[in-house]
Amino acid sequence: MTLPETIPLLGFGWDDLLFMIFAAILVGSALLVVLMRDIIRCGLAMIICFASLAGLYVFAGAPVVAAAQVLVYIGAISVLVLFAIMLTQSKSGPRELVFQTQAFPAAIAAAVLALLIAVTVASTDWLASATRIWTNTRDMATQLFASYSLPFEIVSVLLLAAVIGGVFLAKREKGRAD
Amino acid sequence: MLSFLDNISQSLDAYLVLAGLLFAIGSFGFLARRNAISMLMSIELMLNAVNLSIIAFGAFNPSLNPYASIIALIVIASAAAEATVGLAIVIAIYRNKKTPLVDEYDAMRQ
């Protein structure tokens, strides 16, 4: 059997339904990240947020970036954040007061920012093509390793510097009583 | 019913509004949370929002097509470096001040 072109009763296509599911998971888990009290759960919601973003990257035709998102964000950065949470969470820390006193003005500012971006996006003609373009991975690799090899190498040096700097900053200093 | 949502995944505006929403959520978290690691997680959300908009532009503009993925990959690598150094700084401050809450870091104010 074949599926109908559009979903019965709703009137939009199946890929639109998938896009909306990913978007809803993305926005919902991002809200959980900034609103939940338990910071460990915030970290876990962040993993869901990154996973739905990887799905959206595949939707936008960039499978390599989606794979990098899964490897780097879900595999590395989330684990790093969770370890940092476990290292810095103290039992005596206040768990009831997770927001600053200016949380309400911050919420208003964020809502105004979102509204402003939405209005700007809606009122600008982006000269976009009518359909999505699937990124050709072979083209991308050729460009990355031919024309953009200098930024690529600079990024590797940056990562090395970040690793050494991170170890240096986080290591315990000798000769200090703490 | 709801047929105005037809082809929403084929419009650049939907991706950009989604990215803007994610950026606004991240900025709210950065401004409102007290925990330094929560603020770093909010920064990660904002970086991801920018990445999503870059990918969306690449997906809907043929002249930007392979370059958007390259830029996004470099942004991901830079974000990894930023997260490493940021979390190391938070751990180092925690070791001295015994608290992850940013409003108790007031050594420069006294």
Image (cartoon, coloured by chain):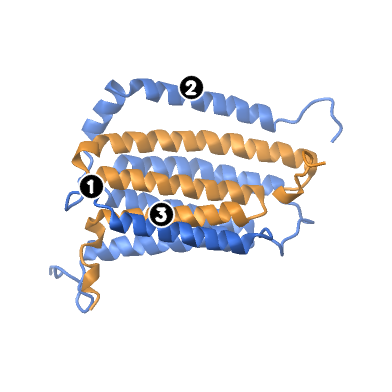
Cα separation between marks 1 and 3: 17 Å
**Chain letter for the residue marked with disc 1 in the picture:** B
Residue B92 - label: none
Q: Are marks 1 and 2 on the same chain?
A: no
Chain drawn blue in the picture: A
Nearer to us in this view, B4 or A59: B4
**Chain letter for the residue marked with disc 2 in the picture:** A
Say whether residue A43 is left or right of residue A171: left
Nearer to us in this view, B21 or A145: B21
Compared to residue A156, the image places residue A51 above or below, namely: below
Q: Give the amino acid type for the residue marked by disc 1 in the picture.
A: Phe
Residue B15 drawn at (x, y percent): 32, 54
Q: Secondary structure at mark 2?
A: helix
Q: Residues within 10 Å of mark 2 (few under 14, many from 20)?
A: few
Say whether residue A140 is left or right of residue A172: left
Q: Colour of chain B?
A: orange
Residue at x 35%, y 55% (from the top left corner): A120
Badge 1 or badge 3: first in the primary sequence: 3
Q: Residues within 10 Å of mark 3 (few under 14, many from 20)?
A: many
Nearer to us in this view, B61 or A89: B61
Q: Secondary structure at mark 3?
A: helix
Residue A41 drawn at (x, y percent): 58, 59
Nearer to us in this view, B110 or A82: B110
The residue indicated by pointer 3 is B20
Residue A26 drawn at (x, y percent): 42, 59
Q: Secondary structure at mark 1?
A: helix
Picture quarter with the N terminus of chain A: bottom left
Visible in this render: residue A32?
no
